[in-house]
Image: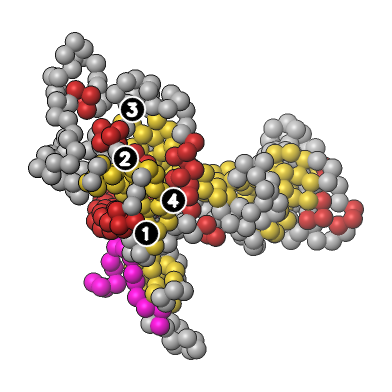
């Protein structure tokens, strides 16, 4: 492999960012990002659906070194303790593998679920799901971050909407999500883990691209109004591009399914 | 058929609400009166029946796997009785119509929903036993715990039951089933099966 591991080449090191020689320098437009991207360039995105056989729907997403897998189960009976509800429920859960981060087990509370991301994923998806179509029942969305390489939550959200679409859950639109980091005077789209650690502020935009609706907007850190405007513009742009990739992924499966069906017959 | 068989994904614009009605897998947005897809699948346009007052064709999205069936009021289900209490019996729904469910759903048959006549004289233990397979209709979504089921129709009730000896019993009347091995007669709310 990379051969940079030095003393322990046999051990899998998920993210080589800790050994990166190139470091970020602020306020210098000529210097590119550690992975040689432009400031407003996303990492290459890859989506695949139907990756978990046991789930009703599933998707895998891979943005550079950020790798997540989302499985959707249900609709199934809500837990007994829940109140009666005329509409369906989404139950979202985001967890990290204990090998997700460069330092083993560093990810939050070691393998257990990430409460904040879980509730943010829920908020991002519930507005886009037609909950009336499965009254009284619950759809479970389990996201597992296999490798944390920065922009984890946006990748999880996009991947989860793809998994919901794969499960045949009715949705108003696909949900795509992108984040930008504010690094000095630059806005950095789709930041890596290293860039996130230097950021002055971050903005996560989740939207339904073909409806032009935002389901969630999270801004942290120090932002000026024109910066927010610029950041949102970059994000909506990137979101609509991601939705194209996600659509073609969904359609790609369909042609494969057709072949499968004809083979069975 | 070329144009009619196009793969669409959730959120894709299917047409204007003034020209099309939304069928399965599609919805109309009230903001801009546009029909969008809500599922992945094949777009199909269905012409309206010639005598309907609304002459807009229906547009629907089908073909891709839908999510597992969920019970709704009025659907006929096949359920296995799990527990019989004095005032109700609980049952796990196994089939909805002709399709098996992917996930388990719990239903309850209340004392007053067992049969249509003499509902004040029903004895739960003379109607169902744990392990019986019953055909029932979903009355309502029920409460937080279970769906409410009813067997108050001739064709609803126990369709298969095992005797104490372990043999599948044969129905001999509306209320009785007999074990072919021992000849013992047990009480059930028997369903009328077949013609």
Q: Which residues are magenta?
A: B1-18
Which residue is denoted by mark 4 in the rendering? A124
Q: Earlier in the sequence, mark 4 or mark 3?
A: 3
Using a 10 Å C-alpha cutoff, classify the residue at mark 4 as few (fewer than 14 neighbours), some (14 to 19) or many (20 or more).
many
- Residue at screen point 34% across, 49% down: A223
Confirm whether circles 3 and 2 share one chain.
yes
Which quadrant of the rendered structure holds the N terminus of chain A?
Answer: top left
Residues B17 and B31: in front is B31
Pointer 4 chain: A
Q: Residue at x 67, y 41 (%)?
A: A81
Can you tell which of label 1 and label 2 is closer to the viewer? 2
Q: CA distance from mark 3 to mark 2?
A: 24 Å
> Element at badge 3?
loop
Q: Earlier in the sequence, mark 1 or mark 2?
A: 2
Are discs 4 and 1 both within one chain? yes
Residue bearing mark 1:
A208
Which residue position is annotated with label 2?
A200
């Amino acid at each position: 492999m990379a051969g940079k591991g030095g003393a322990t080449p046999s051990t899998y090191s998920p993210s080589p960012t800790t050994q990166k020689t190139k470091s970020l320098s602020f306020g210098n437009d000529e210097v590119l990002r550690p992975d040689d991207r432009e400031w407003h360039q996303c990492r290459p995105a890859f989506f695949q659906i139907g990756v978990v056989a046991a789930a009703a729907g599933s998707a895998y997403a891979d943005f550079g070194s950020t790798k997540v897998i989302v499985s959707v189960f249900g609709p199934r009976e809500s837990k007994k303790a829940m109140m009666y509800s005329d509409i369906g429920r989404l139950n979202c859960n985001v967890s990290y593998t204990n090998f997700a981060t460069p330092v083993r087990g560093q990810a939050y509370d070691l393998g257990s679920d990430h409460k904040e991301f879980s509730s943010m994923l829920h908020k991002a998806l519930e507005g886009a799901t037609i909950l009336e179509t499965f009254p009284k029942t619950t759809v479970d969305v389990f996201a597992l971050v296999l490798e944390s390489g920065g922009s984890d939550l946006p990748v999880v959200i996009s991947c989860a909407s793809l998994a919901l679409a794969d499960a045949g859950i009715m949705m108003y639109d696909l949900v795509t999500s992108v984040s930008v980091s504010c690094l000095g005077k630059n806005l950095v789209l789709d930041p890596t883990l290293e860039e996130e650690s230097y950021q002055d502020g971050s903005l996560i935009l989740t939207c339904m691209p073909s409806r032009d609706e935002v389901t969630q907007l999270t801004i942290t850190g120090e932002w000026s109004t024109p910066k927010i405007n610029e950041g949102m513009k970059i994000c909506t742009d990137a979101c609509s591009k991601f939705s194209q990739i996600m659509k073609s992924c969904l359609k790609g499966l369909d042609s494969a399914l057709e072949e499968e069906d004809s083979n069975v017959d | 058929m070329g144009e009619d068989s196009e793969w669409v994904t959730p959120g894709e614009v299917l047409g204007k609400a003034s020209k099309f009605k939304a069928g399965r897998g599609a919805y109309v947005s009230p903001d801009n009166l546009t029909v969008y897809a809500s599922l992945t699948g094949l777009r199909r346009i269905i012409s309206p029946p010639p005598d309907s007052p609304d002459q807009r064709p229906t547009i629907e999205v089908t073909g891709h796997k839908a999510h597992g069936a969920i019970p709704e009021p009025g659907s006929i289900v096949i359920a296995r009785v799990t527990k019989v209490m004095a005032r109700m019996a609980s049952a796990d729904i196994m089939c909805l119509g002709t399709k098996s469910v992917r996930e388990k759903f719990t239903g309850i048959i209340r004392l007053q929903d067992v049969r249509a006549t003499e509902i004040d004289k029903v004895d739960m233990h003379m109607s169902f036993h744990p392990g019986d397979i019953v055909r029932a209709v979903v009355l309502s979504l029920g409460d937080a715990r279970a769906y409410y089921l009813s067997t108050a129709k001739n064709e609803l009730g126990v369709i298969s039951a095992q005797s104490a000896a372990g043999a599948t019993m044969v129905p001999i009347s509306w209320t009785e089933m007999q074990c072919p091995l021992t000849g013992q007669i047990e009480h059930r709310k028997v369903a009328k099966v077949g013609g």
